[in-house]
Amino acid sequence: MIPRRLFNRWTAGALGAAALVCLSLGSARPAAAATIGADGLMTEPWFLNSFMILREDLEEADQAGKRFAVIFSLEGCPYCREMHEVNFARKDITDFVRANFNILQINIIGSRMVTDFDGEELPEKKLAEKWGVRFTPTTIFFPTLDKLPAGVSGKKAEIARMPGYMKPFHFMSMYQFVQEQAYLNGKFGPYVRNKINALKSAGKSPENW
């Protein structure tokens, strides 16, 4: 049997080193183009190849020094397309996310079997219902392995959620909010407002970032 981490390494390919990128103007260089997967979803080639056992995915991210997140997508979803063609098309955003997160993509109406953190095995569609996911794209972020509550579902374990599409500045800020563990000190709203105020003080605007 092929070890799980070797399987992911062979199928996903080697991930080059990526430095942390600060928010700045003029950094929107293009990243590699998204692709269409066998299930019809627009996807990124560096998204996680998974056996769909979520605790194992979290453990793998932890061993790599990364955080774990799940993106729910839908074939033909215009906001999913915008996430890929606008946000993930930017090299600064993609480099930061790849360097700090393992991302698992789930089809909100899919039939692949997923094992939730509480051990329940169910189809992707039922997992979305269980977690209260109603929009695509929805991104759900999870705690570090040492902070994962025992025996709870992903709905109970999540530490942040991006329900729908966010434009690049807010999108990047959410990933930074999780990576910095700023959620331990407060909610996303005040965190991103502080970033916006810092940009305005520097004579910049999040709309032009």
Image (cartoon, rainbow, N blue to C red):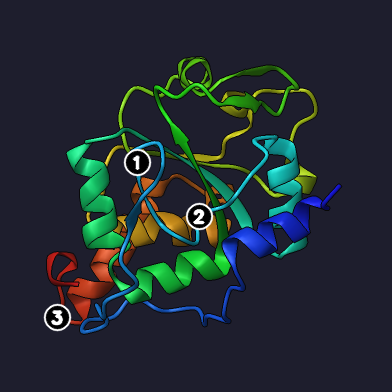
Do tag 3 and tag 1 residues touch (Cβ < 8 Å)?
no
- Establish if 7 lies above or below 164: below
Residue 35, position as x, y percentages in the image = 34, 56
Q: Is residue 169 above or below residue 3?
A: below
Residue 86 located left or right of residue 69 = left
Residue situated in front as seen by the camera: 110 or 73: 110
Tell me the residue at 67%/36% (across/down).
54
The mark closer to the camera, 3 or 2, is 2
Residue type at numbered disc 2: Phe
Q: Please give left or right for residue 185 compared with residue 24 in the image.
A: right
In depth, the one of 77 and 131 nearer the eye is 77
Label 2 sits on residue: 47
Percent across and percent down for residue 1 are 86, 47
3 and 2 marks in contact (CB < 8 Å): no
Q: Say how many tags the image has.
A: 3
| Amino acid type for the residue under numbered disc 1 | Leu
Q: Quadrant location of residue 61?
A: bottom right
Which one is in front in this view, the residue at disc 1 or the one at disc 2?
1
Residue 41 numbered tag? 1
> In terms of sequence position, does the residue under pointer 3 or pointer 2 come before the other?
2
Measure how far apart labels 3 and 2 are at the Cα level. 36 Å
Asked where in the image residue 93 lies, by quadrant, the reply is: bottom left
Q: N-terminal of the two: label 3 or label 1?
A: 1
Tag 3: residue type? Gly
| Picture disc at residue 203 | 3
Quarter that holds the C terminus: bottom left
The crowding category of the residue bearing disc 2, from other C-alpha atoms within 10 Å (few below 14, some 14 to 19, many at least 20), is some
Task: Give x and y (percent) for residue 183.
Answer: 53, 49
Q: Which of 61 and 107 is in front in this view?
A: 107
